[in-house]
Image (tube, rainbow, N blue to C red):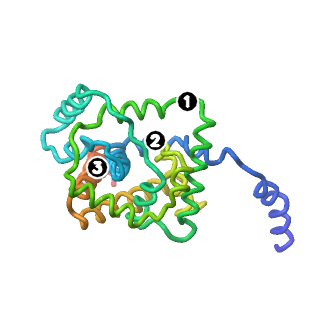
Amino acid sequence: ITERFTYLIDRHFWPYATKRHDDLFYTLLYDPGIGPFVGRYERVLRATFRHYATLCSSATTTLFARNFRTKKGSAQRESDEDAATRAGPSSSLSLGLRECRALLEHAGAFGGQLHGASLHSIFQGVTAVEDLSDDEEDDDDDEDSSSRTSSGSESPGDDDKSQALVLKVSPVTASEHDACPALSFQEFIDVLVAVALYKVPDPFTPFVQRFEAFVVSGVLEPLAQHWKQQGGNGFGATLEMGLEEVKNASKKASPKHVPRQASIGE
């Protein structure tokens, strides 16, 4: 058995394990299961992206908090978004290294092989992968986020408190922050894909399942609890309501189990 195992490793494992696979991460980004998952959680993910993208800037707050809190249904959401579009364009939002590190700190995601240096490497790697892509979906995402941005802003007290939290947990040097370009929403999703590989390196579970479990249980739910404890701007309640909304929609969409009726002969 030992000889057969050694032969198996030498013949079929090492030749492939030692080869570079530069397209592996790029392939995972376009896994057919990633898109549907992001589609289901898009409102919550965009709300999270915009919340942290605006923490250390003067950018305006988004309509997503109002959309989750409203009880008037999708028609009210659409009217709010149309009103934001008519309000005029604004600068597109982007997520910097400092803000992304704060997000992961608040979610308690750091630990094990994931630390500040690895996040810095992820930022640079995601940017390199995006440069190789020929599609221009990022531009569409930026335009969409610009058209949906509200003209209102958070109260000064809440904004100062949020900025203090980010600066406290994110000791990123100015050179590190400037060396990494800020990311668009789609690149933020790419970062989550890379972080999921760090946090859940289980080769026996399909990556889509690992990614979904990490994003929901390892990022969004902890962030909701973190910001509910902080109070202030209500972002924690917004996330919690958004997650509950997705769960309820998934329950309605899933087929109901109908017990099989026994035949006369049974």
The kind of secondary structure element at disc 2 is loop
The kind of secondary structure element at disc 3 is helix
Q: Position of residue 19 (x, y in %)?
A: 78, 53
Q: Position of residue 58 (x, y in %)?
A: 31, 45
User: Which image quadrant: the C terminus?
Assistant: bottom left
Mark sitting earlier along the chain (1/2): 1
Residue wearing tag 1: 135
Q: How busy is the neighbourhood of tag 2: few (under 14 within 10 Å), some, or many (20 plus)? A: many
Mark sitting earlier along the chain (1/3): 1
Which one is closest to the eye, mark 1 or mark 3? 1
Which one is closest to the eye, mark 1 or mark 2? 2
Looking at this view, is 34 or 112 the one in front? Answer: 112
Q: Quadrant of residue 93?
A: top left
Which residue type carries mark 2?
Ser
Please identify the residue farthest to the left as the structure is shown.
72
Looking at this view, is 227 or 261 the one in front? Answer: 227
263 lies left or right of 154:
right
Which residue type carries mark 3?
Lys
Distance in Å between CA atoms under marks 1 and 3: 34 Å
User: Which image quadrant: the N terminus?
Assistant: bottom right
Disc sitting over residue 184 in the figure: 2
Q: How busy is the neighbourhood of tag 3: few (under 14 within 10 Å), some, or many (20 plus)? A: few
Residue wearing tag 3: 251
